Image (spheres, helix red, strand yellow):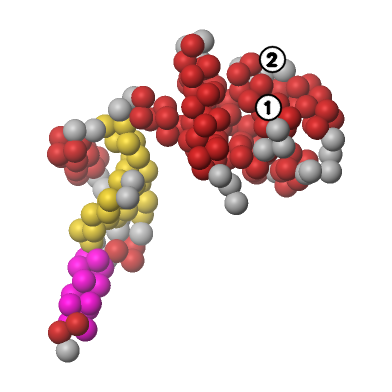
Amino acid sequence: MVNRTLARRYAVAVSSLAGEQQATDRVGSDLTTVADAIAANTEAREFFLSPVIPKPDKERLLAAAFEGKLHTIALHTLLLLVRKRREALLPALVAEYLELQRAARGAQTLTLTSARALDRAEYASLLQRLERLYGKKFEVAEVIDPSLIGGVRITMGDRRIDASISGRLDALARELSHAS
């Protein structure tokens, strides 16, 4: 189990260092690229997460593989995780780092699920109304889910707005089952 609090502490430290060097975007991009590459390759993941491989060997290999290709803060973050035997923390650290970047920009993640792809005018109008209503900028992830039948479902952090037909049918079914 990954400790999100610990990942957040690492992310805050890395973000602070990157901010001092005005390299927050580059460090975030480099960490994301490395984390995605490790997650996508079984052999790389097994090597990176293996407690059997000695720390100096991992450090040497990572330094040789990424020296000059990653920002020094990103590289030293990887090496620190290896040194502390916290390699499994990398995906959570990256997620927390990206969340800190979004917060610094005043943005929040929003998932927009619809039964069909919204045309750009509908999308822009909906996003504009939400930004005006909540006073925030949103980074939108669009999801198509035909089971919604129609309408949209919006998820912002722990808030969910369900304006889909299937959501309304579910609410009606619950209401009818409680009435009898």
Q: Secondary structure of the magenta portion, mostly?
A: helix
Disc 1 packing (10 Å; few <14; some 14–19; many ≥20): some
Q: Secondary structure at mark 2?
A: loop
Report if the CB atoms under discs 2 and 1 are less than 8 Å apart: no
Q: Secondary structure at mark 1?
A: helix
Q: In the rendered image of this protein, does residue 163 appear above or below residue 80? A: below
Q: How many marks?
A: 2
Which residue does the numbered mark 1 point to in the structure image?
A: 80
Which residue shows up at 80% across the image and 32% down it?
A: 55
* Disc nearer the start of the sequence (2/1): 2
Q: Residue 117: x and y, percent?
A: 30, 50
Q: Nearer the viewer, mark 2 or mark 1?
A: 1
Query: Which amino acid does the dot numbered 2 rest on?
Result: Gly
In this picture, which residue range is highlighted in magenta? 165-177
Which residue shows up at 32% across the image and 50% down it?
A: 158
The mark found on residue 68 in the picture is 2
Which residue shows up at 31% across the image and 31% down it?
A: 107
Q: Residue 162: x and y, percent?
A: 24, 58
Which residue shows up at 75% across the image and 22% down it?
A: 63
Residue 117 in sight from this viewpoint: no
